[in-house]
Image: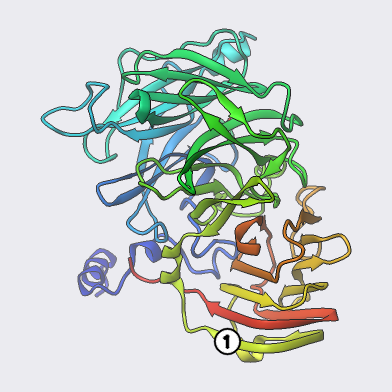
Amino acid sequence: MKNPLIRLVFLVLLGNYSFAQMTQPLPGSEPHRPQYHFSPKAHWMNDPNGLVYHNGTYHLFFQYYPDGMVWGPMHWGHATSQDLVRWQEQPIALYPDNLGYIFSGSAVVDVNNTSGFGKDGKVPLVAIFTHHDAELEKKKSDRFQYQSLAYSLDDGKTWTKYAGNPVLPNPGITDFRDPKVRWYEPQKKWIMTLATKDHITFYSSPDLKSWTRESALGQDFGAHGGVWECPDLLLFQHNGKQVWVLLVSINPGGPNGGSATQYFVGDFDGKIFKPYSTDIKWMDYGTDNYAGVTFANTGNRTILIGWMSNWQYANQVPTSPWRSAMTVARTLGLKEINGSFLLISTPVKELDALNGKPVLLRNLTVKGSQELTAKTGNLNGLFRLDLTASNSTDFAIVLANEKGQELEVGYDKTANQYYIDRSRSGKTDFEKGFGKRHTAPRLTPDAALSLTLLADVASVELFADGGLTVMTDIFFPDQPMNRLFIKSAKGLTVSELKVTPLHLSKP
Ligand code: FRU
């Protein structure tokens, strides 16, 4: 079968060719291509946008510049998945127009057709996004960002921009963007959470087209090392009580430098968000989970995907012909500790579809450094590691390669901190702040230590203590991290260590 098209059709008919794999060239030609994290086939990507579940499909739109490898005039790229694990890239959903570039925003399923965009009983998907007028920006206007709508009647395949755009003009605030819209059932209205420079403003609407300002907050609390962006307002049921969480991404000013996402927990009454406390809390202490937002229309599940990069170096990372990947999808929840609510993140259960046969080790005492590779086999840097220990002392998991490059994920008992050290992890000199050690507090120092680590060829995601402390870091080794070690100078008593190889298989 010489004709590649006939061969492809044949393979697809046979069912032994996955579309996800089809988009992922072999690691040899693209050594840093994530294998189970979404990355576009080519060109620049940043924030996830318009995350929505509709008719059995998860939609991931994203900030996309299809003509270059660095940030440029923004479009909404598009990918879909049936299981949050295997993504298929789709044609571009939204192109810039005479109102500007298409910046970040959200999408909702307008089940009651409040917008009137539905036709012949077809429920509209409505995207609410920021138009960014680069010409106005150049002219030093302060009104170059405003909110607009587009809708789709064919499950997100094609989109029509609303003729009445913009639906929310700019009142004179330079940074006025990233609308995240959700339905507020008690008052049967839409709520838009909008980033407005150094604070959040809430708007409401009966029909997505006309918006009323409800309230603003945040100017005098929270982290303010940089501009506020990409907010999200989440609702949790906690022991029969409604608890709201406000996510706010900031850039720069993150706990380990550059971009990061903070959150506040409180009450929301359809008008005002009242935080229970104004302490600074971070959803993820790593440097590479930014602008994360949650899916609309997933019932009681709260599922987040973030952009796995950081504005500090996103335009320089050594990948080609694409730049950036997304985090894995994560389930968010709440945990009450000593009367205060904390956000927990864990990988979605759907990711188990990637699991190969695990290697399980029980009641192991680690003293010094132990190589696990002989037991696990060569994982090529693609694995999930689950560990529980019965004492808590200094230890580290080390990913290494034949070139002696290492990525270390560990716990420092004295400082009571988890850390990821990527200073010797491969290519680091493309940006001066990249090759660093990052730290995160351990919030339950008295409990038994447990963690889950997800490793892909160019990233690690640490979910410690049931997801209370999370760290996401990218790295760029010159060869796959094919060796795995665990080390502890003081002696770690491991109750259980499970290492599971991960494989991307057919959707
Ligand atoms: C966040 C962000 C958003 C903006 C988009 C532009 O990373 O700066 O505030 O809408 O990226 O691409």
Looking at the picture, how far across and down is residue 430, in whole percent?
Answer: 75, 50
Is the residue 299 above or below the residue 14 in the image?
above
Element assignment for label 1: strand
Looking at the picture, how far across and down is residue 504, in whole percent?
Answer: 43, 70
Is the residue 336 above or below the residue 67 in the image?
below
Instruction: Out of 342 and 304, give the one closest to the viewer.
Output: 342
Picture mark count:
1
Q: Residue at x 73, y 37 (%)?
A: 279
Residue identified by numbered label 1: 360
Q: Residue at x 78, y 76 (%)?
A: 404
Q: Residue at x 55, y 47 (%)?
A: 306
The answer to whether residue 503 is visible is yes
The quadrant the C terminus occupies is: bottom left
Is the residue 111 above or below the residue 347 in the image?
above
Compared across the picture, whether 23 is left or right of 10 comes to right
Residue 360 in which image quadrant? bottom right
The answer to whether residue 72 is visible is no
| Residue furthest left as drawn | 120
Compared across the picture, whether 314 is left or right of 230 comes to right
